[in-house]
Image (spheres, rainbow, N blue to C red):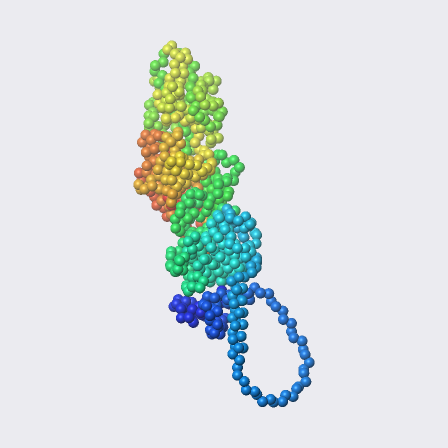
Amino acid sequence: MRVNDKIVINELVCKALGGAISDAEGRYLQHLLVAEPEAIAYYQACINVHIGLQKIQPILADSYALSMYLEEMAEYEKNAEAIHVPEPKQKPRPEPVKVEPVPAAAHENSRTLLYTAILSTAALLLMMLYVYHNPRPVRQEVATLVDLLNAEWANPEHVQRVGSRVMTAQGPVVLTKGMIKFLYDDGVEVVIEGPAEYELLSSMEMALHTGRLFARVSDTGRGFTVRTPNTRIIDLGTEFGVAADENGDTELHVFKGKTALIAGFERKQKEIVEVSARQARRVDALNADIKAIDLAASGFARSFDSRQGTVWRGESVVDLACVLAGELNPIRAGEVALARVPETVWLNDEPNESEPGMFQPIADNPFINGIFVPNGVDGPIAVSTDPHLRWEAPPSAVRQKIAFLRFDLRSLVGDISGAMLRLNVRDMVGIGKPIAVYGLVQEEYDAWSEAELNYLNAPGLRQAPLGRYALDTAVLQRLGTMAFRGAGAHYSTTEMLNLDDFIQRDSNGLVTLALLCEQSDLSAEWRFISKEGDPTQAPALVFPRVDNGPVEISTAQGNGADTYASHDNHHNIITTDKTHGAETGVCVRNFWKDTILVTNAGAVQFAPSDGGEICPFMLNQQPVGTADSPVVAMRANAGVTFDVQQMRRYVSENRPPRCFTVLCGVPENIAEYSTVYRDGYVPSVDVYVLVDGQLRFRRSHLNPTLEPERIRLELGPTDRYLTLVVTSATEQKTVFDWCLFVRPRILFE
């Protein structure tokens, strides 16, 4: 029988003999006597000691002092060194002596001898009590510091490193911040979360003056005790958390097994209750009253890993927004972040570009397997680090941008030879790569409408797979190329682009040119100033030899506020934390540039070129992405994959995943901002959810006018990779094609 069991039995016996034991305490005493074979013998010993000490009751004023005395004696007996007593030597048997009977003399008993014996016993007990209350500190190694996370101590002398041994009799230690994890020699694991003040008392006991503590007790550590200013908590095979605040209140939360909670102060009547799994109690600082409270299921740091920066608080619900968000964690009872995500590190040294379908793993985040650009134009794509899991992704709406320009030449008179195309480059990527210039040779198509031009009706475009350009050479004839060396005005040369034959064959006075990038490294883009941007710098045909010239003919029609000639299959891969304006408090975390964000401010700000507006996120006329519930906002085209089995390792008892739930939709007010792109444009996206590369959910043409979609997918115990994908549902993806994933969660059994 363990020492702490003896202590509890002794206290209960004292209360029973004093008539102060409660019904619950009586039942608990009976339980101990039945559970421990040696308990009955110890119970009888306690009764005998109690009866024997009745004559010196003034010295032992209450049962608490008796309890402390017995506890000290038991602790001394446990730690004392064994004493070798030599066997007595054999002495020769003495010769028998003949004894003559002597008549007994009559005399009275001496009262002086009785008083002397009583006073000697009292003096001995007083000495023992003095030793108990004024012990000599004996330092003893009892545990090892096995991990720490951002730990800082108030006293430099208390600073410890991982692997260092921890001793008793060090006095109170103040942990100002961070977390530390002790492993006692008997297998008891203790996590302390700063700020806290603690003290290691023995190999089976520690004191928590203030702060939070979680203990996971092994079978060999049964009986481990935690003291606070007004309680003593004795483990009976448990996982439990203790919180001691500055006011002196103590909370006990039992997650597994059961404990004995002893509440009270020295020289005061104590109360003992048994607290079982999924129960919690608060002990008042003033009167030591015990009250039942709600269990804080995720109120204590139960485990952490300093190498990965992860902290587990017992969650069985994992919020994927929190997994992505890092510091943007919600404060919600029972639902907090699974991990603090460190700054993202990519496996490639310089991953500045990502081709369609290329999967980018995240090296140092165990819960995010990676991200990718979804485009199945070249076949199945990788959606995880498992090379066997590939997805037949649909071709994404990332067609090559083609600029159509129409010029009205009916005012020209005379020689129209030697025409040059002038383009004013605003900005560019991929300096030195030329663009190709095509001419529309079938004049019946010259009447195209700028407002209605798209990939389905643009003259000379075949119905090609998304992500590819396909020109009908019977309608569009290649005329030549133009090259650029930087921003500013550029003129075509007759060596690279001869327009004479094409213009002279025109009969209706309208000519259409199409511009596109033929030599693309998936990161080439040129932006030309259009007639809407600045009419004086708009694309123009220059005719130096006409009778009324030289003449510059600006575009009468052009497709877009800025004329593009680009290949738009690229994304810059960056990770930053940034704030758009202190007064707005819009905080986002970028995983790709403006592509995968997590926001807790309920809004996102567009770049100045896209209007610069701050768009609040609204679904069902309610703000989402708020401080207590960050959302994952994904812009087409992007995909992210989570590793469910890695999360499972941090879930209590390695519970298997049960289901994935989320509410997704396009922000209902984003159409108000997309008019910057084109009047009447309505953002629209396609949403996909995959499990281990298999399509489990699809929603097409989700837009702001439709109800948000509620998704619930059942998960099996072996399911590992959960993938979210957003692609544009329109022929022209824009910066306004957003999808919000509100409360994306994985529930475990």
Q: Is residue 88 above or below residue 291?
A: below
Q: Position of residue 569 (x, y in %)?
A: 44, 33
Q: Residue at x 41, y 29 (%)?
A: 401
The answer to whether residue 505 is seen in the rendering is no
> Which of these two is toward me, 713 or 158?
158
Q: Is residue 2 left or right of residue 530?
A: right
> Which of these two is toward me, 72 or 62?
62
> Which of these two is toward me, 380 or 170?
170
Q: Is residue 414 above or below residue 470?
A: above
The answer to whether residue 486 is seen in the rendering is yes
Q: Position of residue 465 (x, y in %)?
A: 41, 34
Q: Is residue 14 above or below residue 521?
A: below
Q: Position of residue 622 (x, y in %)?
A: 32, 42
> Which of these two is toward me, 275 or 683?
275
Q: Quadrant of the C terminus?
A: bottom left
Q: Is residue 562 left or right of residue 221?
A: left
Q: Residue at x 40, y 68 (%)?
A: 21
Q: Residue at x 54, y 85 (%)?
A: 107
Q: How many marks?
A: 0
Q: Position of residue 168 (x, y in %)?
A: 54, 57
Q: Residue at x 44, y 28 (%)?
A: 525
